[in-house]
């Protein structure tokens, strides 16, 4: 038996506590779709996975102590054969299965920290379902789990001599905290508590838990541009995304001072192959955010980077303990329910290796959930671009709010990438141009620009790279003349060449001439007559 870590204990207490955002398990659920899955090798691979990575059999006692359960009937592949079902029954069944697994609590008291099942479908199709409790497996460890399962499908590893041996528990035994460093970090945090800003609260009274996922994929072009700008200004890509996310939170909650929950995943090099161990190595940093409207995006991001570096230097005192101290100071529970998780440091710059896609299938759904969390924003490299994933408690938001918040962040990312002074623009101005209202106002401009390009036999969309068309000065001249005559906006040939997408050009026109959307509507009506 081993005591739970501070993070594990927070998860354990949160799943059993009655509260507006509590009473749910901290877990991660994913689905993979493929054709031609062979059941027999997958069954053997799943069994080997539970043998090799004993943390997936983590058992938690009523007293809150962890141990490894012996292999039992739960530690195998569960199979549902729906090949003879109708299309409507399959669609309904898959939807019900996704909903149930997205909300479930795995039986940790029985050593079920991971559940893997396969649904067989017509036409040799299948869906693989993997659900894991974060008490046993953090986000980085989930990648280890999936990669190992794909490996074992092709080649089984030797059976461990001692199935009860646990690298995870061995790591915990070796990872003894430095009392002196912890004391210094605690004293530093005590000096910060009184000035720590409040956390954003639910925008609606939470009801029965309704977890959902919102996602968008940035193109390879967009992702490369943001990476280039970050390098150019000596910023980390994670910090740039965090800064823009903080601006969208500021807009959504109408707050200029607030705190965010920023997880970190660090493994002390205490034993061989520590990077291959499955376990919960996560800690959280409580980041105080202050939006200064006149500060440039570069300066704001640099300030956040400096803050994060200071927080990491005092991470010997865990963020969960800081939250408890905050609660004692204020006399009530002080949670931080908005989380920002960056996965750009993943080896190979992608969520999973090509072998995972070839063996287990296409990642078609992934969602995480946790107690005292209403929004977990995650970013990672995926499919040559960047995947943005929001895991949300829908019941904590009024209808329609979450898509608007995500649209604001998307527009901030777009303006930063393609609007020429985006990085040096004051964040107040950048945010004013990125609201959903501003994006809606610019729709006539996007429509007009696409219409004008179509008259030049250029058929594209608002997010495509215009540089691919190699427009000559003669081709650009009529476009410049229309913009100047009807929209009262003068753009040089070079400015047009530097504007990569239609959306970016529409935002630039709107910034220079606020009345341009109305003029564009009139011109569109005249062209349609």
Image (cartoon, rainbow, N blue to C red):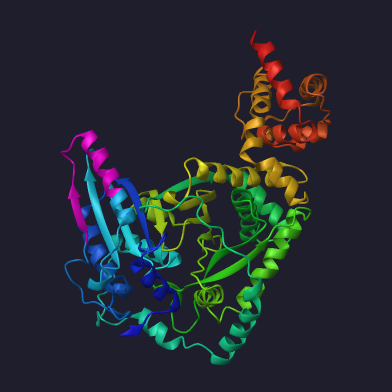
Side of 342 where 273 appears, left or right: left
- Residue farthest toward the top in the current orientation of the protein: 529
Quadrant including the C terminus: top right
Residue at the (34%, 84%) spot, across then down: 2
Asked whether residue 521 is in view, the answer is: yes
Residue 85 inside the magenta-drawn segment:
yes
Nearer to me, 417 or 198: 198
Q: Which residue sits at x=27%, y=72%?
A: 57
Tell me the magenta residue range. 77-98
Q: Position of residue 338 (x, y in %)?
A: 53, 59
In the rendered view, would you say 70 is above or below 305? below
The one nearer the camera, 335 or 303, is 335
The part of the image, by quadrant, that contains residue 10 is bottom left
Q: Residue at x 34, y 63 (%)?
A: 132
Q: Please tell me whether residue 78 belongs to the stretch shown in magenta.
A: yes
* Residue 109 in which image quadrant: bottom left
Along the line of sight, which residue is nearer the eye, 44 or 314?
314
- Give residue 247's position: percent from left, percent from top: 65, 52
On the rendered image, what quadrant is the N terminus found in? Answer: bottom left
């Amino acid at each position: 038996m081993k005591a739970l870590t501070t993070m594990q204990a927070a998860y354990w207490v949160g799943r059993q506590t009655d509260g507006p955002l509590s009473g749910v398990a901290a877990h991660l659920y994913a689905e993979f779709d493929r054709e031609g899955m062979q059941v027999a090798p997958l069954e053997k691979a799943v069994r080997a996975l539970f043998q090799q990575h004993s943390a997936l059999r983590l058992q938690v006692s009523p007293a809150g102590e962890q141990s490894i359960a012996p292999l039992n009937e739960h530690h195998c592949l569960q199979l549902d054969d729906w090949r003879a079902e109708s299309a409507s029954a399959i669609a309904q069944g898959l939807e019900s299965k996704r909903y149930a697994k997205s909300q479930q609590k795995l039986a940790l008291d029985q050593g079920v920290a991971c559940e893997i099942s396969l649904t067989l479908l017509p036409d040799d199709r299948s869906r693989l379902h993997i659900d894991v409790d974060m008490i046993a497996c953090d986000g980085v460890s989930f990648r280890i789990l999936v990669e190992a399962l794909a490996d074992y499908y092709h080649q089984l590893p030797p059976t461990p001599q001692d199935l009860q041996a646990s690298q995870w528990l061995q790591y915990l035994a070796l990872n003894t905290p430095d009392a002196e460093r912890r004391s210094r970090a605690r004293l530093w945090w005590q000096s910060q508590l009184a000035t720590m800003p409040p956390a954003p609260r639910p925008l609606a009274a939470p009801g029965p838990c309704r977890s959902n996922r919102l996602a968008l994929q940035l193109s390879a072009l967009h992702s490369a541009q943001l990476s280039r700008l970050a390098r150019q200004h000596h910023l980390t890509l994670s910090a740039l995304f965090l800064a823009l996310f903080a601006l969208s939170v500021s807009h959504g909650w109408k707050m200029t001072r607030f705190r965010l929950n920023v997880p970190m995943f660090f493994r002390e090099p205490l034993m061989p192959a520590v990077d291959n161990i499955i376990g919960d190595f996560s800690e959280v940093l409580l980041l105080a955010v202050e939006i200064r409207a006149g500060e440039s995006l570069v300066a704001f991001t640099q300030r956040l980077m400096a803050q994060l570096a200071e927080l990491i230097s005092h991470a010997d005192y865990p963020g969960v303990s800081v939250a408890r101290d905050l609660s004692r100071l204020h006399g009530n529970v002080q949670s931080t329910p908005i989380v920002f998780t960056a996965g750009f440091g993943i080896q190979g710059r992608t969520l999973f290796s090509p072998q995972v896609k070839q063996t287990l299938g296409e990642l078609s759904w992934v969602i995480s959930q946790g107690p005292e969390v209403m929004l977990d924003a995650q970013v990672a490299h995926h499919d040559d671009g960047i995947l943005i994933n929001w895991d949300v408690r829908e019941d904590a938001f009024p209808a329609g709010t979450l898509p608007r918040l995500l649209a604001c962040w998307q527009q901030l990312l777009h303006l930063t990438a393609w609007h020429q002074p985006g990085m040096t623009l004051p964040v107040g101005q950048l945010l004013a141009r990125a609201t959903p209202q501003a994006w809606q106002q610019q729709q006539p401009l996007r429509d007009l620009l696409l219409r004008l390009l179509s008259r030049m036999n250029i058929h594209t969309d608002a997010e495509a790279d215009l540089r691919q068309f190699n427009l000559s000065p003669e081709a650009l001249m009529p476009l410049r003349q229309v913009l100047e005559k009807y929209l009262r906006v003068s753009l040089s040939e070079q400015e047009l060449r530097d504007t990569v997408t239609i959306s970016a050009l529409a935002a630039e026109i709107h910034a220079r001439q606020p009345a341009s959307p109305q003029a564009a509507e009139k011109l569109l009506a005249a062209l349609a007559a």
